[in-house]
Amino acid sequence: MINEDNIGEAWLISAHENGPSLILNGEHKGKTPDLLYKTNREMFSNIKAETFPLLIKMIDAMINYLSKSIPMMRWLSNLTL
């Protein structure tokens, strides 16, 4: 549960190596999303990527991030995929 203090950023669901989430109940209780991806690839439409890049964040909207996001958006627009 999130309190009323400024928290900045919270990783809500993550398969990131620096902070994977833990599945709390159900058939896969105790596993992390990255382990689930490695062992049950069919649940992820058999994606061929080596890792599953899942990270869902909540960012404190009380902080003005616009000045940080505009340079990133310009950088991303120059990428060729």
Image (cartoon, helix red, strand yellow):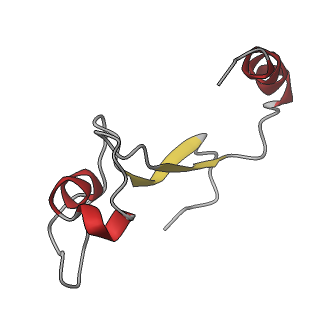
- Residue in the image at 80% along x and 21% along y: 77
**Quarter of the image where the C terminus is located:** top right
| Quadrant in the picture for residue 39 | bottom left
- Residue in the image at 82% along x and 17% along y: 74
Q: Is residue 51 left or right of residue 7?
A: left
Front residue of 4 and 81? 81
Q: Is residue 68 left or right of residue 31?
A: right
Front residue of 8 and 52? 52
Q: Is residue 48 left or right of residue 10?
A: left
Q: Against 22, is 5 above or below?
A: above
- Residue in the image at 32% along x and 70% along y: 43
Q: Against 56, is 23 above or below?
A: below
Q: Position of residue 25 (x, y in %)?
A: 23, 81
Picture mark count? 0
Q: Position of residue 67 (x, y in %)?
A: 84, 21
Q: Against 45, is 58 above or below?
A: above
Front residue of 31 and 24? 31
Q: Against 48, is 42 above or below?
A: below
Front residue of 66 and 38? 38
Q: Farthest bottom residue? A: 26
| Quadrant in the picture for residue 28 | bottom left
